[in-house]
Image (spheres, helix red, strand yellow):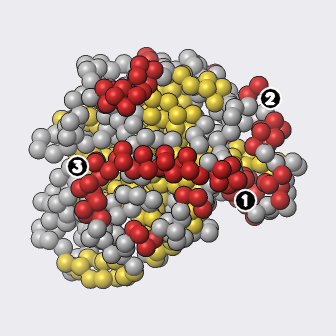
Amino acid sequence: MLNSKMAAEGGGKEMNEIKTQFTTREGVYKLLTHSEYSRPNRVPFNSQGSNPVKVSFVNVNDQSGNGDRICFNVGRELYFYIYKGVRKAADLSKPIDKRIYKGTQPTCHDFNHLTATAESVSLLVGFSAGQVQLIDPIKKETSKLFNEERLIDKTRVTCVKWVPGSESLFLVSHSSGNMYLYNVEHTCGTTAPHYQVLKQGENYSVHTCKSKSTRNPLLKWAVGEGALNEFAFSPDGKFLGCVSQDGFLRVFNFDAVELHGTMKSYFGGLLCVCWSPDGKYIVAGGEDDLVTVWSFLDCRVIARGHGHKSWVSVVAFDHYTTSVEESDPMEFSGSDEDFQDQMIHFGRDRANSTQSRLSKRNSTDSRPVSVTYRFGSVGQDTQLCLWDLTEDILFPHLPLSRTRTHTNVMNATSPPAGVSKFATLSLHDRKERHHEKDHKRNHSMGHISSKSSDKLNLLTKTKTDPAKTLGTLLCPRMEDVPLLEPLICKKIAHERLTVLIFLEDCLVTACQEGFICTWARPGKVGLLSSQNQASSPSGTVV
């Protein structure tokens, strides 16, 4: 259906060709067809009315050197496999664990990286009817069920995550717009919880549970209007970014339960959110077809990216291709803990040095340094986009940035042959293209308005009138912030894309048909595990 629709829009045959490789300045990324994970029968899943396919990874540090494990949901089913990545073909005949649920579907899941061993892993699974299950797919034991009677919340679980650094605390968001903090050691109680307000602010409130004995939930957060679609902890675990159907990104100090800053989408709901490796930037995507870059320090939008033709479903930073080029040596600093949860099993040393250099770059403006953050996005348009966030966007006030062009930066840091066309337009260029861009943007709005009519009805009930936020710091006009163009934008699936994860040797995507694809980074095809460990970090600019 999607294909015929695209063809009707003038895409024709070329538009429907699915790419199996793409080239960036660091080289060629290749789809490894033998490393595809799916249901054992490999039959495309009929996804009508089903929840998005999601993927979670964990490393269990076993002695074989093949400690990566993958979990994914397809319809009513949940699978747990050994993940062989770029090394060996996937063997779908031997899942470590497989579960089929009745009356409810898994919607999201998260491993506790802190407690994972070869003998035991703690996996949280959220469900469409509101429950959260804690299981151990290695021991095959179902440990606990939370919100079992749906007394806490009856709506779909949209996101579940372990609190960074904790073995027992986890956070769950629902399409009701509420989030709940649980402790795995506590029970949920046999009656609906009673709450008292702990803290209240603009369009959010936090409540504690009133009861004689400690019970779940420990806290209830009511955030915004409509569904809370996703949340993400900052790399240090101290802050929480939430995106909601009312179009707002809200960033909280998690422990102090205080609002740090907000941002409003250009149009419609926000669906996804992620943090840069150093916690200084947040990227959000959603129903405006855009990716929006927000500065945590300045609490403002610093760029938008336009490449998708439909809703953006996932955004993610590539920790391994975020690069810092220095003119003189620096001592590295930064503790392991800062990065523990995101980087615990994939190239932590590399990521930490990048993180510490990024923080030095941002605090030492006098030293000439080139910095590039790489992030990616996938959408309902079946396309993968990669983006570079470069220093002229990050530091527009520095004379250095004005005089250097992108190409000069790249020529100084990589061989000329590897230089691709750069992905940002200066404000000057964009003024000239203003009329053309306006036309494009209006077309984009028309393209998604039919899908969004029900969401728009919901949005009219919110307290914040979109017309009043446009042109303010919450939501600058399109011409007031730099517009990024993607490095690459490739159609890579037949169905809408629901997963994008960057690993050390590869990146992983998944579509709603239930196919999880592994894309080898440049030079990483078919590596043996021994070579793998000896090789330098992949996808980096040296």
Which residue in the protein does label 1 denote? 395
**Residue 420 can be seen in this image:** yes
Q: Where 253 sits versus 39, above or below?
A: below
Which mark sits nearer the N-terminus, 1 or 2? 1
Mark 2 or mark 3, which has the lower sequence index? 3
Q: Would you identify the image quadrant in which residue 11 lies?
A: top left
C-beta proximity under 8 Å, tags 3 and 1? no
Amino acid under disc 1? Phe
Calculate the distance from the C-alpha at mark 1 to the C-alpha at mark 2. Answer: 25 Å
Q: Which residue is mark 3?
A: 127
Count neighbours of disc 2 (C-alpha within 10 A) and say few if under 14, some if 14 to 19, many if 20 or more. few
Tell me the element at label 1: loop
Residue sitting at 73 percent across and 49 percent down? 371
Give the x, y percent position of residue 146: 22, 57
CA–CA distance in space, label 3 to label 1: 43 Å
Instruction: Specify whether residue 344 is in view.
Output: no
Cα separation, mark 2 vs mark 3, equals 49 Å
Location of residue 541 in the rendering, given as x and y in whole percent from the top left corner: 72, 36
Q: Is residue 235 above or below residue 324?
A: below
Viewer-closest of 421 and 140: 421
Q: Quarter holding the N terminus?
A: top left
Mark 3 and mark 2 in contact (Cβ < 8 Å)?
no
